[in-house]
Amino acid sequence: MVLPIPSQFIWRTPTVSITIEGKNSADVAKFLGTKGIFTYHGHFYAIELTEKLGVETSVGLLRIGLAHSNSLEEINQYFSVLVEL
């Protein structure tokens, strides 16, 4: 296994994957896109994990990438839009 070098952490983008109870991740991604928030859905080459989590054949995962270029206002907008679901 190759571990990242701590001095390279500033170049990495934090990524979070979530599910929303009762919502299909593809539908959530499309809805967020209409609000100008771009996310992805699926298994992201982690199919064994999504199978073990039981989301592969049902809702999938919603992937959120937060980069150093995201402002706090943009992140707050994301969460504000999520509560509309």
Image (cartoon, rainbow, N blue to C red):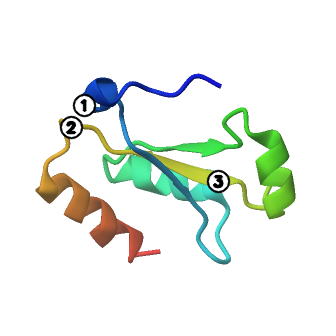
* Amino acid type of the residue tagged 3 in the rendering: Leu
* Residue 82 position in % (x across, y down): 40, 69
Question: Do the residues under discs 2 and 1 have CB atoms within 8 angstroms?
Answer: yes
Of callouts 2 and 1, the N-terminal one: 1
The amino acid type found where label 2 is placed reads His
Residue shown at 64% from the left, 69% from the top? 23
Q: In this figure, which residue is indicated by the disc labeled 3?
A: 61
Which tag, 3 or 2, sits closer to the chain's start? 3
The label on residue 68 is 2
Question: Dot 3, crowdedness within 10 Å: few (<14), some or many (≥20)?
Answer: many
Q: Name the residue under label 1.
A: 10
Please indicate, yes or no, whether residue 82 appears anywhere in the rendered image: yes
The residue type indicated by label 1 comes to: Ile
Which residue is rendered at x = 57% and y = 53% of the image? 62
Out of 41 and 84, give the one closest to the viewer: 41
N-term mark: 1 or 3 = 1
Which residue is drawn at the image coordinates 33% and 31% (left, top)?
A: 6
Left or right of 26, for residue 40:
left
